[in-house]
Amino acid sequence: MTAYGTLFKQFREAKGYSIREVSEDIVSYQFLNNFEKGNSNISLSNFVKILEKINLTYEEFFVAYDETLEKIMENAIKDLRVVGSSWNALTAQQLIQKYKKLYLETEWIVYHHFALAIEMISIMGRGNQEEVSAEYFQSMKHEIKDYLFKIETWTEYERTLFNSLNFLFSKDEIVSVMDRLIRNMKTGSNKLRMIDDESAGEIIGNAILELLRKDAIKEAEDLFIKMKASIKFDKTIANISNIIEMQYLEGLVKIRNNDDSGLVDICNSLNVLVLLKGYDSIANAMYNTYLMHQKDSIITDKIIPGSPQFTIKSLEDNS
């Protein structure tokens, strides 16, 4: 819950309370001071207590938090995409300085994390890790990893951070983080701010794709089995894209396990997506991901919006 400290400080100061008044009988002065700087991870029970000290309900706090974070995230995601698609070193440096400046002005840890994320994505994308020392690059990696490993409650912010930087994690680290996320979903330990099944499915799905990229096929298969057991989408039109993505992931895992029945799963999922209005680009992106995992494609790739067109080529076509 380190990301909440800066906003809490704004509320505390606006209401005229001192750190000493709020921390008394709950946490130490130094601890609350560090929490407000984003350097301490307060427990849920103590967080509720300090909110009560400043006469603020957690519902009121999180309405404000969500509105603030939504604006930050919207801009940060755009910036991450710019860096990830252009690999322009000058653009990356400008964005890094922008987020460093925002962090100095606000002490909001999310700005610091996005500065690190942009720098690492830029360096990795250009294949130029030599431009910084190995120690510096490792320190950036460890800071992000440590945050995601220790954070008790995942919100949309942690989801974005992990999805953007999961390539930094080893296969064992990915499995460890996802196991904890699934365990928290089962036990309800994230009651206050737990991400919904759709967001959890996106996180785990991206983790499975990263495991497949790392050729950790057994780990990807095991994680998919856990995902299916933990996330249940009602078979309604509102959940159709989530159900399709689950079928697609299952197909990819099967293909990497040399199970040709995965081709049927992938074809079916792509065809349904194309039938849905506005999903052509997603179908194309998923098809391109499939190509990464099966270089000698035996699925056709002609896009005809509004009608099924992904089919498995006949054996004669591939002979």
Image: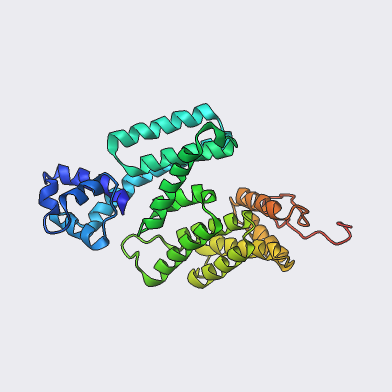
Q: Residue at x 14, y 47 (%)?
A: 19
Please name whichever residue, 245 or 210, is drawn nearer the observer in this view of the structure.
210
Q: Residue at x 29, y 39 (%)?
A: 107
The quarter of the rendered structure image containing the C terminus is: bottom right
Q: Determine the residue located farthest toward the top in the rendered image.
A: 90
Give coordinates of residue 63: x percent, y percent: 28, 52
Locate residue 109, reporting x and y percent: 33, 43
Of residue 282 and residue 199, the one placed in the foreground of this image is 199
Which residue does the image show at 65% across and 63% down from the upper left?
253
- What colouring method underlies this structural image? rainbow
In the rendered structure, the answer to whether residue 43 lies left or right of residue 232 reads: left
Q: Going by the image, does 197 lie left or right of 281?
A: left
**In this picture, residue 261 sits left or right of residue 141:** right
Q: Quadrant of the N terminus?
A: bottom left
Tell me if 131 is positioned left or right of 303 in this view: left
The picture places residue 289, in percent across and down from the top left corner, at 65, 52
Look at 44% across and 43% down and name the residue there.
139
